Amino acid sequence: MEEWKTMEIIKLKYFISIISGIIIGLILGSSIIIALVSYRVDSYYEEIQKLNISIEERDERLEKLEQSLNNKKLILKDIEIILAHEEDEIDKITIEKYAKEKYIKLLGREVETIDVDIIEEIIDKRIFKLKNKEYQLEVTKIVLTDVLKIWIQTRPIN
């Protein structure tokens, strides 16, 4: 009879260890899956934010173009910034965005009513502070058609 009780205890311990192994495996597996899914959700959220910003910019451009569509004259449809910047690429993108924001109000206006000298003075000789760096912006060339193209040179200030 004692042998039978000992066998039952061994079987019970074996059963408990198998069940606990399954439970621990389920917990670890689900934790790993949750981590992977949350990483992908975060990356999708970041991409959605970028796309929403792009949509807002295009909606604003479309609205201004539709307002000026009634006029049959040459209308400013886009702004292109060509930046000569040899340092960090992220800094270059930030400076381009800053410069584009300065000119965004010109979209949808008649090209004939835009003064090129004022366009140059908006950015020319400005000092742009970024992190611990300072850059002086200099407009080198402007072409004004239905697309405003501005060439800007940056110089680091020590």
Image: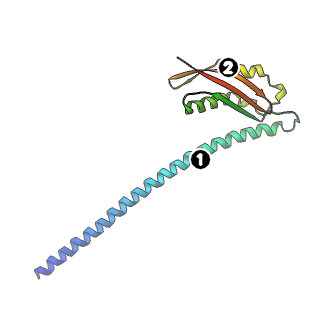
Q: Residues within 10 Å of mark 1 (few under 14, many from 20)?
A: few
Residue closest to the far bottom: 1
- Judging depth in this view, the residue of 156 and 30 nearest the camera is 156
Residue closest to the far left: 2
Q: In percent of the image, x 17 and y 78: which residue is there?
A: 7
Q: Residue 111, image x and y in percent?
A: 82, 29
Q: Is residue 39 left or right of residue 54?
A: left
Q: In percent of the image, x 71 and y 19: which residue is there?
A: 121
Does residue 40 lie above or below 114 as drawn? below
As drawn, the label of residue 36 is none
Q: How is the image coloured?
A: rainbow
What SS does tag 1 mark?
helix
Does residue 87 lie above or below 4 as drawn? above
Three-letter code for the amino acid on which mark 2 is drawn = Asp
Q: Residue 49, image x and y in percent?
A: 59, 44
Q: Nearer the viewer, mark 1 or mark 2?
A: 2
Three-letter code for the amino acid on which mark 1 is drawn = Ile
> To which residue does mark 2 refer?
124
What SS does tag 2 mark?
loop
> To which residue does mark 1 refer?
48
Q: Quadrant of residue 134?
A: top right
- Judging depth in this view, the residue of 115 and 68 nearest the camera is 115
Compute the Cα span from label 1 to label 2: 35 Å
Q: In percent of the image, x 69 and y 26: which residue is there?
A: 151
- Judging depth in this view, the residue of 30 and 158 nearest the camera is 158
Mark 1 or 2, nearer chain start: 1
Q: In percent of the image, x 75 and y 20: which residue is there?
A: 118
Q: Is residue 92 left or right of residue 110?
A: left
Q: Is residue 27 left or right of residue 127?
A: left
Residue closest to the far right: 72
